[in-house]
Amino acid sequence: MTGLVKRVVALLYPDREWLQWVLDQVEPLWGRPERLLEGVLFASTDYYREIAPVLYRGFCSFPSLQSAEGLVLWKKTAIALERRSAVRRRVNIDPGYVDGARLVLASTKDHGHRVYLGGSVFAEVTLLFRKGRWCPLDYTYSDFRSGVYDAFLSDVRRDWCRQVKEVRQ
């Protein structure tokens, strides 16, 4: 099933109210989130301080398998949602996907380790799944490197494995 992935969204938000706002916005677009991780204090960089002085990381995954080709559109949709959040955005929304081998996230920022997809969107393999665990790469952000999201991502990966098996039958 090459190209079929589980859509995930990595979120930064200042409080539970803004998390709920994001979830309310994405549900009509991508469906009700299947899995949710919330409330992980985000303190690994001050890059996003324009959003709020204290931020939390969250993730959600969505029920059905999608084509990885949708990543550019997912990022453009996320950018539009960020702009709707306030004059100065109140959330950061990074869509991506999990499959059997990796976590990929979309970005509008170019770096040497990112691949240009078109439409000002780049893809980054943020973590690899090897020998039963999530492995960071040299450039992986410290919060992803810490392993705090690994259990959530492993659950999403198991969802992907189960759904791919169902599609193949």
Image: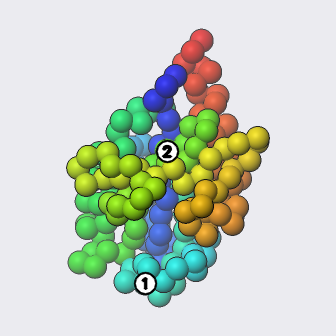
- Residue sitting at 60 percent across and 61 percent down? 138
Neighbours of disc 2 within 10 Å: few (<14), some (14-19), many (20+):
many
Q: Quadrant of the C terminus?
A: top right
Give the residue displayed 61% in from the left and 68% down from the top: 143
Q: Residues within 10 Å of mark 1 (few under 14, many from 20)?
A: few
x then y, percent, for residue 120: 25, 55
Badge 2 is on which residue? Answer: 97
Of 129 and 32, which appears nearest the observer?
Answer: 129
Foreground: 105 or 65? 105
Q: Position of residue 151 (x, y in %)?
A: 71, 53
Task: Give residue 41's position: percent from left, percent from top.
Answer: 61, 76
Q: Quadrant of residue 107?
A: bottom left
- On residue 169, the disc is none
Q: Is residue 48 above or below residue 116?
A: below
Q: Which mark is residue 49?
A: 1
* Residue 160 picture quarter: top right
Q: Residue at x 39, y 70 (%)?
A: 91
Which comes before the other along the chain, label 2 or label 1? 1
- Figure check: 54 above or below 67: below
Q: CA distance from mark 2 to mark 1?
A: 26 Å
Q: Does any portion of residue 28 appear in the rendered image?
A: no
